[in-house]
């Protein structure tokens, strides 16, 4: 199983690479890795398992973060309602591609963090408010999802990892809480 020791931290060169497209049909190795990445997210959101294995809670994980420079991310985004079993989005995305996006930008009110960054980096991270993403799932099926709000922020954070981009690259250095005209804040 994946634990925090498998997650590389900022400064590791793999985090700055552009990850390679995954060949289709999917190999057993890639499918197994995808399931392991999802298992990490599920475990990290389970209070007992997170404590037992000292996991930082995560809603997303990109393969480069476990030193696999391939275009695959896992996202496991729970609904807002307490104890609701339903998830806004829970899937492993192979070769995800943003095929269209809103002109409008949004950012999370509380900023962002990263499992590969062991420090707080305050500031707004402006992203597309809405995105349409195509990808292949672990069954090799092509999927197309339209995302907004928190889920759109998470998926863009993950796809950034596939392009060697860290969330703080997008924070305005002069004024981290700079808000351009019309940027929507998600709280
Ligand atoms: O790359 C995944 N990761 O480092 C975990 C944190 C994911 C994440 C956290 C806040 C806002 C968007 C995405
Ligand atoms: Ni991250």
Image (cartoon, grey):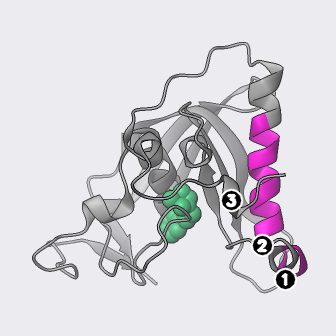
Work out whether residue 147 can be spotted: yes
- Which is nearer the eye, 93 or 86? 93
The structure residue drawn at horizontal position 75% and vertical position 60%, both measured from the top left corner, is 3
Find residue 127 and report its horizontal and vertical position in percent: 34, 60
Instruction: Name the mark on residue 5.
Output: 3
Query: Between disc 2 and disc 3, whose residue precedes?
Result: 3
- Which is nearer the eye, 99 or 176? 176
* Magenta stretch, residue numbers: 33-49
Rounded to the nearest angstrom, the CA distance separating label 2 from label 3 is: 17 Å
Find residue 6 and report its horizontal and vertical position in percent: 68, 53
| Mark 2 lies within 8 Å of ligand 1 (Cβ measured) | no
Find residue 5 and report its horizontal and vertical position in percent: 68, 59
Q: Examine the image and state in which quarter residue 39 appears.
A: bottom right
The structure residue drawn at horizontal position 77% and vertical position 53%, both measured from the top left corner, is 2
> Circle 1: is it few (<14), some (14-19), or many (20+) Cα within 10 Å?
few
Q: Secondary structure at mark 2?
A: loop
The structure residue drawn at horizontal position 83% and vertical position 22%, both measured from the top left corner, is 28
Q: Which residue is mark 1?
A: 83
Q: Quick check: 100 left or right of 103?
A: right
Q: Secondary structure at mark 3?
A: helix
> Circle 2: is it few (<14), some (14-19), or many (20+) Cα within 10 Å?
some
């Amino acid at each position: 199983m994946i634990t925090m020791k498998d997650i590389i931290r900022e400064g590791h060169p793999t985090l700055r690479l552009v990850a390679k497209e995954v060949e289709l049909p999917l190999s057993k190795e890639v499918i197994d890795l995808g399931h392991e990445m999802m298992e990490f997210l599920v475990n990290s959101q389970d209070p007992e398992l997170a404590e037992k294995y000292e996991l930082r809670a995560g809603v997303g994980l990109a393969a480069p973060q476990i030193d696999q420079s391939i275009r695959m991310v896992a996202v496991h985004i729970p609904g807002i309602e307490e104890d609701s079993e339903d998830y806004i989005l829970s899937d492993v995305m192979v070769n995800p591609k943003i095929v269209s996006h809103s002109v409008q930008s949004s950012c999370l009110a509380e900023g962002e963090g990263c499992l590969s960054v062991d420090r707080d980096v305050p500031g707004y991270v402006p992203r597309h408010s809405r995105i349409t993403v195509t990808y292949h799932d672990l069954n090799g099926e092509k999927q197309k999802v339209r995302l907004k709000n928190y889920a759109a922020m998470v998926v863009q954070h993950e796809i950034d990892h596939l392009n060697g981009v860290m969330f703080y690259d997008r924070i305005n250095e002069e004024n981290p809480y700079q808000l351009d005209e019309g940027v929507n804040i998600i709280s």
